[in-house]
Amino acid sequence: MSGPAHATALLVGDGPSRELAAALEAEHIVLLQAAPGTAVATLEAAVQGGSSPAVCILAGVPAPLALVRELRQGWSGPVLLACPADELAELRRRLNYTPMLGPNVSLLEESDPALAGEIVKAVRAEVRARQLRTTLQRANARLAPASAAMAGAIAGTSDVHRLVTAERYLTRFLEQSAEAIVGLDGRDRVLYWNDAAARLLGPTAREARGRAIGELPFWNDAVAQALAAVRGGAEHAMAEVQAVPDTPVAVLEVALSAIADEQGAYAGAMLLLRDVSERHRQLALERSRSIEAISVANSRYRHLAMLFDRAPGFLAVTRGPDHVFELANRAYLATFGSRALLDRTMHDAFPELRDQLFMRLRDEVYRTGEPYVGRDVPVQVRLRPDAEPVERFLEFVYQPLTGKDGRVWGIICQGNDVTGQKQMRDQLLAHQNELERLVAERTAELQSAQAALHHAQKLESIGKLTGGVAHDFNNILQILRANLELLGQAVDPAGSAARRVDSALAAVDRGTKLTAQLLAFARRQPLRPEPVDLAVVVRSLSDLLHRALGEAIDIETRAEAGLWATLVDRMQFENVLLNLAINARDAMAGAGRLTIELSNVELDARYTARQEDLRPGPYVMLAMSDTGRGMEPEVLARAVEPFFTTKPEGEGTGLGLSMAYGFMKQSGGHLKIHSEPGKGTSVQLYLPRTLELPASQAEPAGSAVRGGSETILVVEDDAEVRAVVTDGLAGLGYTVLQAEHPDAALAVLQGGARVDLLFTDVVMPGKLRSPELARLAAELLPGIGVLYTSGYTRDAIVHAGRLDPGVELLSKPYTRQQLAARVRQVLDRRPAQAVPAGPAAPPAPPEPAAPPALRRVVVVEDNDDGRDLLCEMIGLLGCDAAGVRTAEEALPLLATADILLTDVNLPGMSGVELARHAHRDHPGVRIVFASGGTRPDVDFPAAAIRKPFSMAQLEVALKGAV
């Protein structure tokens, strides 16, 4: 089109794009621009200056409907609202509820490619409407003098001729117009109806003239509102009619212009009718195509973004010399730490990288424009801003990005975290060195069979070190105590020798406490719960607590009246209280107040459901509160973890609270800690109530020793211990038989000896174990009593931390009085049943036990050299190793395995998933993770060893998995 030079459009808001400006310039449309705040003033100035805009475009304007309402007060032309796609539906909904804006308001998406075309069409329509109004006004101007002359009866022939000419001109213009035109008189009846209107709507001019506009096919509420607007003084108005009845017109645009008489009063209206169905169809088609194109582009972008984000190696793009992040994938965040990166510089996002080689190399690549390939580059990273730095090794490429001018504008970094591979290489080297050392040692050890045997026994005993030391030490103490007690009977009680004996016995007592602590540390001490009154326990510890805490700490005890009894191992509970009190003393720096409260509580199901292994019901609660420094939340969260301590190195083991926690769980109770920095700590111990009455106090030490005449079989592998026990029992009047191991004892019983009591150690060499000896003895001699003695029970007679039901145990070392009391007690408790008079026919001897089978270890490691070396090390440790590369290969081997030793990161199924399968399908298989990273967080029992590890560390891990 060649639009008139004076055609203008007003753009309010965002400036025009290059494409829009070019399209309007090609159509000779002058574009006025205004900000939202000056839009009304700019429009008024343009109207008063005679250059009223043909259309007004609002682009990116806040509250656009309010601005349209202000513009409508002085201008009623067409308005185009361009807005973002996500606001289009809401703006259209609000527009339907804002009828006062007029019908000629259109909505378009601001990115719609049809926007420029819609503006051009609107300008064209408005220019044509103005031309028509100008023609009608000229015709009215010519008719007005003629009408006045006729009314005064003074018009001449020339005036009549002009009138006829003007009417003919107007009629011809209306009839020949390509646009459908309808003229209305002052009563809104059809005055003009041209051929174009007849072709468009159906009725002929004769059928239409004189009809009220409400009778026409296109009449609707929108047309009625537009007509009311021009009757009310508006120069023009717009309306749109959807699906005109009895016509093929899908969308009809109706432009109304007011016609005034010579006094300016409303005399009628001119309607310009246009079929805009095709325009709407094309617009909808273009929108659909645009939406489809945008959808395809977005889909491709999302696909590329997904490929970038899920790339196995880390990727990042930075711009500028400060290295501002533009893109970074999830592997980059996993490698360097998860945090917000976009539009942040490297120094801002990762301050820990400053002055590191990784950063200096990036600066050098940006400066020189030369790419760089790094291998095994060390870098210290923080996986969280508040975390401690960890070292990683990276392989990466720095590739500079250049613009059209050849200058570097950014860098793309692509690489991989090779920490695992680096650690594996280091591990292989360490293993090779370790293997060479072991081969040298093994060669020397193989020179004699005795050295080889000693080495095997040493490997077997590492996992039993703590309990074994306690066991041997208890035997030594038992010999010392027994001999000292016998010696004490033979010396003058008033002499110096008696004092030396008493001093030595006191030393034995201290050694006894030491072995008890060793067993408690190893959690091998069996619990012997009994009904106790905790108030009595606390009162009995009063003096000890005052001595342990010092005079600067006030101790206050409050106990509820009618305190319930609870079932607990008293001695172990006293140790727990003492440990908690010492912790409180350290927290108060030796001065403050310690409060011990005892009360009866009911724990409901709502509370116990949030705890582990805790049942609702009645409990006895002991709370120990101090006025110390308290604990921070992060410290409190780890307070009961083993070996966690906030004390300086050498001043705490970190086992006090963890042992207390384990003891409470073992006793069916619960431990809860409340602490606040600066206000102190309260540790609450909950133990289940028992309806049993508290046990009576043990027999006083000074009571008389009572013996008997029964026959006792003593089974003890230590000759010295066996001798002193035999002498002690014989001195009490008993007949004593001896055996150095269970097999010898069984032979004595099978030989027909009439034995009333079997007094046997628990841990002894030989094929026959003590519990099995006791079972066979009961079969041979129904009614025989059994009393065990040990300084280290292991699991022979202890399960779940408690003595098996009906088992009697005398812990080493013991006094002569304790020995006499427990022997007499067990003998007196025997069932009233006759012992067979004659020797029983000996049963068939038990079949010799088969030698223990080698433990089978399934090794899962994807590095071939590392796997072969690891299997060789395991073989040197006396185990049978089977190595595979993947978890899938390991699955069928689990059925015959004792231990699963697996890496965490494997091709295919991960080591954690493999371990989960093993725990679910083969619960007897013990699991050990071997990884260079952190220990996996799993919800099933598992051990872990960190790469690279030594032979000794591997041995400990395998022993601990048994």
Image: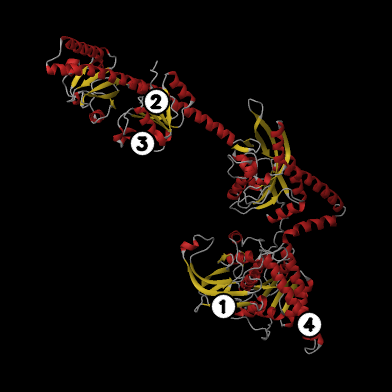
The part of the image, by quadrant, that contains residue 583 is bottom right
Q: Secondary structure at mark 1?
A: strand
Outermost residue, front side: 154
Tell me how far mark 4 sits from mark 3, CA to CA: 107 Å
Tell me how far mark 3 sits from mark 2, CA to CA: 19 Å
Mark in front: 4 vs 3: 3
Residue name at image x 76 percent, y 46 percent: 872
Q: Secondary structure at mark 2?
A: strand
Mark in front: 3 vs 1: 3
Per the rendering, the mark at residue 557 is 1
Residue name at image x 47 percent, y 28 percent: 294
Per the rendering, the mark at residue 9 is 2
Give coordinates of residue 244: x percent, y percent.
26, 23
Which amino acid type corresponds to the residue marked 3 in the rendered image?
A: Leu
Picture quarter with the N terminus: top left
The part of the image, by quadrant, that contains residue 782 is bottom right
Mark in front: 2 vs 1: 2
Residues 608 and 264: in front is 264
Per the rendering, the mark at residue 65 is 3
Mark in front: 4 vs 1: 1
Mark in front: 4 vs 2: 2
